[in-house]
Image (tube, rainbow, N blue to C red):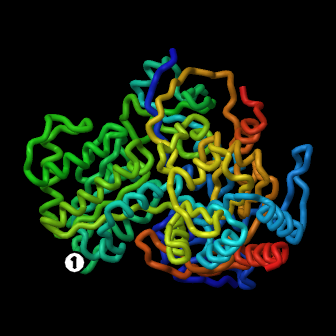
């Protein structure tokens, strides 16, 4: 069942390390192509940990792997580390400040176990060429 | 034999640690070990040694493949792109030294560019707030030596500034803080119980996006006025208690991060956080500091501050410096199709801008100057790899508290590789030639 959560983004140490090791490497996808969900939200979603899910907002959609929150509990709040995956769905409106609204985007999360999590370069390349599903 | 270089500056985050030790081979060409750095900093040094590192510029072909080109060709493309454009965006500038920032600014002035740095998606809203109401701040040295009340509001240094807590804010023993962390009270305000919160005395799990209300409640609590039972998800008793803890300190420092700058309210959240600091100064000494991300984003604000009078989002297209966040900021310009070429140096908007802005970069003539292969280089027409500042070339950088620190070269770059500064100087010379100035 699809659930609605409030999405925030930000840095994690795994994001930082894998970013410096090369954003084209699989470790970067492992670190950032994820969504951290609270156990209570997992229960509502009715999906196993480490299942791929599709995250959709008013602004876009992306497939990431759902993992249990590492810094929880935070029911109702979901976390995607900063990076191209999060940026497919965040609210780009700056409301005249220059700053996109990276934190606090309402999103819908549904299981998508047969859809792959793309690598960072593939994601932006396909996105720019209009080749994303 | 190997050599150990001491007192090396880490070019990762705004903490700009200055106590690293790096072991290099005798000929200075190979970097072997890094000591004292955090996991991210160590990885940055070690990645410079990657076997698969790109060492020559490349240009995207019609069929989508890359073709290796010479630095001369890359300089020609860049200079032509910038001079042909009506209003190019020159973005990034945070992972390079102040010397390169100054040369880039000269190019920007000649070609009538909009100059913007990563503050635009980081602490830009803090800068707006500082212009609104000022900022009572201090240096990290004062924090280490004096602060006995430490607040982390909407920031998670355990992940983003890993050595900040041990070098300056929680654990170190300073001149007036001889007991180290046992003499300090630490308050974390975050919608998640973060790893930073786990070492704090108090964690206030604020409702996401309700920071303004909670900051305002603190100002009410300082004065002992009445609060509703719950504010932003926090019971009033906890707010009164935390307010008293702050008031009873000898020196309060408030660090704040993306939790407040990127949530709704934005610069107004920071206005209120600064007002909290100002109010606290009625009772004790208090200061506030943004947790700056890139190691030299503060430096680019400084350089443009003294060159143009504004710290980010500087529009030079009319022949003089204009600044109007919301209008002259990168994401707004890209969203409204108001720039016709994009030059990126020392940043990765491809990974860190909302996707609709990334698509706009892809649609335009574009150049990315970056040692790494990144989502930005993936969407740009030309990618120019350069030497790592702080690893393969030195130069000035500003720490998050506006203290300038000279970074050091510890190892030779791959043979024939240009630095940011060298590349920009050549582009500047070519731009002048084309314009006949």
* Residue lying at 47% horizontally and 50% vertically, measured from the top left: A97
Asked whether, in this view, residue B71 is left or right of residue A8, the answer is right
Asked whether, in this view, residue A55 is left or right of residue B171, the answer is right
User: Is B379 located above or below residue B182 in the figure?
Assistant: above
* Residue lying at 62% horizontally and 76% vertically, measured from the top left: B102
Asked whether, in this view, residue B149 is left or right of residue B248, the answer is right
User: Is B363 located above or below residue A113 in the figure?
Assistant: below
* Residue at the extreme top: A1
Q: Position of residue A34 (x, y in %)?
A: 57, 37
In front here: A91 or B306? B306
Q: How many marks?
A: 1
Q: Residues within 10 Å of mark 1 (few under 14, many from 20)?
A: some
- Residue B56 shows up from this direction: no
In front here: A34 or B74? B74
Which chain does tag 1 point to? B
User: Is B370 located above or below residue B18 in the figure?
Assistant: above
Asked whether, in this view, residue B199 is left or right of residue B2, the answer is left
At numbered mark 1, what does the secondary structure look like: helix, strand or loop?
Answer: loop
- Residue B163 shows up from this direction: yes
User: Is B89 located above or below residue A11 in the figure?
Assistant: below
For residue B291, what is the image quadrant?
bottom left
* Residue at the extreme front: B318
* Residue lying at 81% horizontally and 61% vertically, measured from the top left: B84
* Residue lying at 43% horizontally and 24% vertically, measured from the top left: A41
For the C terminus of chain A, give its image quadrant. Answer: top right
Residue hosting label 1: B176
Q: Position of residue A18 (x, y in %)?
A: 61, 52
Q: Position of residue B42 (x, y in %)?
A: 58, 65
Q: Position of residue B81 (x, y in %)?
A: 80, 61
């Amino acid at each position: 069942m699809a659930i609605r959560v409030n999405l925030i983004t930000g840095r994690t140490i795994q994001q930082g390390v894998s970013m410096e090791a090369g954003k084209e490497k699989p470790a970067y996808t492992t670190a950032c192509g994820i969504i951290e969900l609270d156990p209570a939200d997992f229960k509502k979603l009715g999906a196993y940990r480490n299942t791929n899910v599709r995250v959709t907002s008013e602004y876009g959609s992306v497939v990431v792997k759902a993992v249990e929150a590492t810094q929880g509990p935070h029911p109702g709040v979901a976390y995607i580390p900063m990076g191209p995956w999060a940026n497919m769905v965040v609210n780009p409106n700056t409301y005249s400040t220059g700053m996109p609204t990276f934190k606090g985007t309402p999103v819908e999360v549904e299981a998508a176990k047969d859809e792959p999590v793309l690598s960072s370069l593939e994601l932006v390349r396909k996105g720019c060429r209009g080749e994303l599903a | 034999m190997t050599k150990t270089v001491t007192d090396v500056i880490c070019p990762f985050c705004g903490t700009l640690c200055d106590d690293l030790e790096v072991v290099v081979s005798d000929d200075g060409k190979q970097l072997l070990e890094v000591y004292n750095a955090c996991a991210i900093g160590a990885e940055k040094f070690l990645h410079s040694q990657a076997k698969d590192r790109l060492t020559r510029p490349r240009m995207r072909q019609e069929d989508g493949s890359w073709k290796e080109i010479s630095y001369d060709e890359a300089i020609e493309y860049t200079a032509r792109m910038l001079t042909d454009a009506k209003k190019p965006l020159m973005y990034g500038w945070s992972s390079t030294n102040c010397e390169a920032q100054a040369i880039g600014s000269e190019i920007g002035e000649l070609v009538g560019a909009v100059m913007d740095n990563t503050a635009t998606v980081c602490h830009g809203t803090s800068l707006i707030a500082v212009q609104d109401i000022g900022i009572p701040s201090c240096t990290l040295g004062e924090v280490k030596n004096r602060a006995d009340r430490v607040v982390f509001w909407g920031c998670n240094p355990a992940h983003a500034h890993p050595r900040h807590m041990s070098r300056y804010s929680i654990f170190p023993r300073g001149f007036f803080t001889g007991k180290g962390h046992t003499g300090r009270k630490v308050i974390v305000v975050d919608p998640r119980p973060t790893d930073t919160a786990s070492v704090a005395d108090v964690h206030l799990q604020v409702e996401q996006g309700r920071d303004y209300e909670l900051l305002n409640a603190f100002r009410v609590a300082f004065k002992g006025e009445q609060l509703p039972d719950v504010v932003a998800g926090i019971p009033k008793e906890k707010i009164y208690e935390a307010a008293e803890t702050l008031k009873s300190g000898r020196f309060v420092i408030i660090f704040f991060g993306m939790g407040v700058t990127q949530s709704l309210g934005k610069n107004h959240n920071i206005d209120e956080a600064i007002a909290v600091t100002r109010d606290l100064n009625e009772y004790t000494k208090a200061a506030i500091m943004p947790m700056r991300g890139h190691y030299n984003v503060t430096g680019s604000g400084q350089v443009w501050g003294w060159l143009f009078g504004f710290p980010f989002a500087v529009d030079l297209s009319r022949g003089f410096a204009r600044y109007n966040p919301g209008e002259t900021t990168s994401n707004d310009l890209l969203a409204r199709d108001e720039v016709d070429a994009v030059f990126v140096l020392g940043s990765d908007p491809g990974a860190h801008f909302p996707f609709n802005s990334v698509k706009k970069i892809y649609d335009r003539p574009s150049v990315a100057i970056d040692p790494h292969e990144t989502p930005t280089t993936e969407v740009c027409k030309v990618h120019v790899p350069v030497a790592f500042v702080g690893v393969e070339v030195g130069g000035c950088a500003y720490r998050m508290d506006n203290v300038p620190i000279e970074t050091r070269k510890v190892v030779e770059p791959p043979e024939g590789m240009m630095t940011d500064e060298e590349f920009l100087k050549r582009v500047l010379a070519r731009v002048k030639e084309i314009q006949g100035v």
